[in-house]
Amino acid sequence: MSEYVICPYCGHQNAREEEHNIDMKKYGKTCFSCDSCDKLFTLRDDGDGEFVSN
């Protein structure tokens, strides 16, 4: 797991917080609100690795 997640809309690096790590372990996905453009996107892990979906 990296410390940052890249926004698929504007390319901004968003910091990954502890709450995101807990959601990933518990649910296999977590939601981000981009600090730069304020759009929502989801980080998911289906077992093959993490990926961003919008």
Image (tube, rainbow, N blue to C red):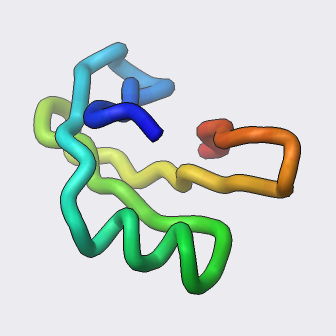
- Give above or below for 28 relative to 35: below
Residue at position x 46%, y 77% from top?
Answer: 23
Q: Position of residue 38 (x, y in %)?
A: 21, 46
Frontmost residue, 18 versus 52: 18
Q: Quadrant of residue 14?
A: top left
Figure quadrant of residue 32: bottom left
Picture residue at 46% right of the left edge, 40% below the top: 1
Residue 47 drawn at (x, y percent): 85, 54
- Counting every numbered tag in the picture gives 0
Query: Which quadrant holds the C terminus?
Result: top right
Q: What x and y, as percent, mark residue 2?
A: 38, 33
20 w.r.t. 49: above or below: below
Looking at the image, residue 36 sits to the left or right of residue 7; the answer is: left
Query: Residue at image x 35%, y 15%?
Result: 11
Task: Name the residue: 66% across, 41% down.
Answer: 50
From the viewer's perspective, is residue 52 above or below residue 11? below
Q: Is residue 19 left or right of residue 31?
A: left
> Does residue 37 appear left or right of residue 28 in this picture?
left
